[in-house]
Amino acid sequence: MKATAIAPSNIAFIKYWGKKDEKLRLPENGSISMNLSNLKTVTTVEFSRILKEDAVIIDGKSEKKEMERVVKHLDRIRKIANLSDKVKVISQNNFPSETGLSSSASGFAALSLAASKAAGLNLSKKELSILARQGSGSACRSIPDGFVEWLNGDTNESSYAYSLHPASYWHILDVVVIISQDKKDTSSTEGQKLIMSSPFFKVRLSNIKRKISLCKKYLKEKKFSELGELIEAEALELHAIMLTSSPSLIYWLPGTVQVMRLVKKLRSEGLSVYFTVNTGQDIHIIVEGRSRENLLEKLKRIKNVKKVIVNEPSEGVRLINRHLF
Ligand code: DP6
């Protein structure tokens, strides 16, 4: 059977950084995110007895490293479905991958739903989130709708994401600013292995539960500026860990810092804007409806800004009828 799924990427307000179990991808801490309406992956999967080997094409290419990671995930699904058929996978992102926009989140979320359906399984959202997490941690948050919490469980079954609020709950925007399409030199998976070398990682863990409950409270009460302050401080804390790891991880480019400074300046002029950054040079600006036009106008004037993608909160992964082959 053939199945196709579409999944959004997501932006973490409280970040996942570090695993307490590498194999199962159990995180050191819980995290909170929002799904993004205009960063999407579409994936079609078909299992077939006729195929001689697995074929995986992502954005028109078959790269060995990506292929191995995808096949490992397909093996998890074959095991659950008790299936030995080979598989064909075609996947398309509508945004640059490996520049810090979390293509592994949307990618493994779409793959989990499309492949499990194509294998004849009917997994619940919780089961899908547990499955997606094993492909890429942040992917478990692209399964449920809207604003999402990933629970920091100690076992495979207790570490999954669920929806805190639907996408329609709050019309805040995430403006993604693309600084460069160059791929980052250290992946999130590799970067995370360095956590314990930063003297500040333990400090981060000691405060993280409080941060998560504050983030949930501000979301619940729709307190935009409090939420924004928290998100921005969280991103800078994450990068403080990265910068003080050994070897150090420096993901920012001059354009990243320029946009950070612009956001702070606009805030001093009264705009409701806050930034967050993941592993990469691209930067996300969280903005409330009214400040949007002014922000976009200012971004146009920065030479280092290559492209801007405006995102609303989005629903999670879903099946579609338009197959890619
Ligand atoms: C900084 O989910 O890409 O974006 O589980 O190894 O695939 P793996 O890592 P990944 O890490 C995301 C890190 C982050 C923060 C976040 O999205 O929570």
Image (cartoon, helix red, strand yellow):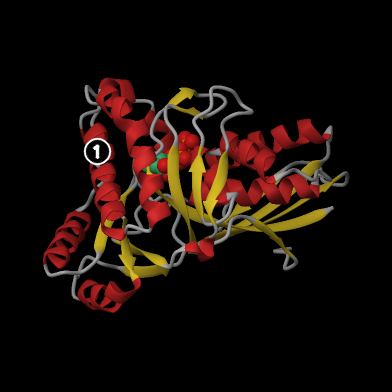
Residue 209, relative to residue 262: is it above or below?
above
Seen at 72% across and 68% down, the residue is: 322
Q: Judge from the rendering whether residue 68 lies leftward or rightward of residue 215; answer left or right.
A: right
Rendered location of residue 58, percent (x, y):
58, 53
Which SS class for mark 1? helix
Residue farthest to the right?
A: 49
Query: Within the displayed image, which quadrant is ligand 1 positioned in?
Result: top left
Q: Residue at x 45, y 26 (%)?
A: 19
Residue 218 falls left or right of residue 314: left
Quadrant of residue 301 within the rendered picture = bottom left
Q: Residues within 10 Å of mark 1 (few under 14, many from 20)?
A: some
Left or right, 321 with respect to 182, comes to right
The answer to whether any part of residue 32 appears in the image is yes
Whether residue 63 appears in this view of the structure is: no
Relative horizontal placement of residue 121, taking residue 24 as reference (left or right)? right
Q: Position of residue 116 (x, y in %)?
A: 75, 44
The vertical placement of 272 against 106, above or below, is below
Extreme residue in the front direction: 221
Mark 1 highlights which residue?
A: 237
Residue in front for this viewpoint, 207 or 312: 207
**Amino acid type at mark 1:** Glu
Position of residue 118 measured from the top left corner of the image (x, y, whole percent): 79, 49
Say which residue appears at 41% left-offset and 37% top-offset. 16
Which is nearer the eye, 253 or 9? 9
Image spot of residue 263 (x, y percent): 19, 62
